[in-house]
């Protein structure tokens, strides 16, 4: 049975559950972000990555999905993103290090915000801004993640 997703769907669905069942040329569909916002989504679970891509595409973002650091670097070199959205198994420090390596290898500046979501290092529903335009977050709902992305992109 397929799960019905809304803006209020708890994000633990995206963070911890891997059994959740193309890029859109349309951008900027009324969410308040820049019309040209491109988000590179790095997530190591395909089903979750695909779901995040679908939800962000509905919001009008152009989304480039990547399954690992190498793929993310190739994509970022081909089409520099406006924002990196990263969630990987392991601790938040490793995800931050991965994002910083992607930035360096793809020659992205600190203007490209990095959002590490589902970070176990922050409390549920919280957001922590680190140096270098890096944000750790563990949003309660997709709507909370949406607001953060809108603010940063």
Image (cartoon, rainbow, N blue to C red):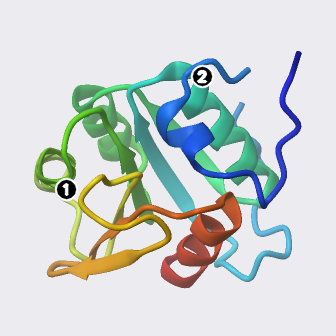
Q: Which residue is mark 1?
A: 103
Residue 121, placed above or below residue 112? above
Judge from the rendering whether residue 81 lies leftward or rightward of residue 89; answer left or right.
Answer: right
Residue 5 lies in quadrant: top right
| Circles 1 and 2 in contact, beta carbons < 8 Å | no
Judge from the rendering whether residue 53 lies leftward or rightward of residue 29; answer left or right.
Answer: left
Q: Residues within 10 Å of mark 2 (few under 14, many from 20)?
A: some
Q: Residue at x 85, y 75 (%)?
A: 30
For the residues labelled 1 and 2, the Cα–Cα distance comes to 25 Å
Q: Nearer the viewer, mark 1 or mark 2?
A: 2
Measured as percent of width and height from the top left, residue 100 is found at 14, 56
Q: Nearer the viewer, residue 68 or 121?
A: 121
Residue 104 lies in quadrant: bottom left
Measured as percent of width and height from the top left, residue 105 is found at 12, 46
Q: Which residue is mark 2?
A: 47
Mark 1 / mark 2, whichever is N-terminal: 2
As helix, strand or loop, the secondary structure at mark 2 comes to helix
Assign the N terminus to one quadrant of the image: top right
Measured as percent of width and height from the top left, residue 21 is found at 73, 20
Q: Nearer the viewer, residue 1 or 95?
A: 1
Q: Residue furthest front?
A: 123
Q: Residue at x 26, y 38 (%)?
A: 73
Q: Residues within 10 Å of mark 1 (few under 14, many from 20)?
A: many
Q: Residue at x 60, y 50 (%)?
A: 11
């Amino acid at each position: 049975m397929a799960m019905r997703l809304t803006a209020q769907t708890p994000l633990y669905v995206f963070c911890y559950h891997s059994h959740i069942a193309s890029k859109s040329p349309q951008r900027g569909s009324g969410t308040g972000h820049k019309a040209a916002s491109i988000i590179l989504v790095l997530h190591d679970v395909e089903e979750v990555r695909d779901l995040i891509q679908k939800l962000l595409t509905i919001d009008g973002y152009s989304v480039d999905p990547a399954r690992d650091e190498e793929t993310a670097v190739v994509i970022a070199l081909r089409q520099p993103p406006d924002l990196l959205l990263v969630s990987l198994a392991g601790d938040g420090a490793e995800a931050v290090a991965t994002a910083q390596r992607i930035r360096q290898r793809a020659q992205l500046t600190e203007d490209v915000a990095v959002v590490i979501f589902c970070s176990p290092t922050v409390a549920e529903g919280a957001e922590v801004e680190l140096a270098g335009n890096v944000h750790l977050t563990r949003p309660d709902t997709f709507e909370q993640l949406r607001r953060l992305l809108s603010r940063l992109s």
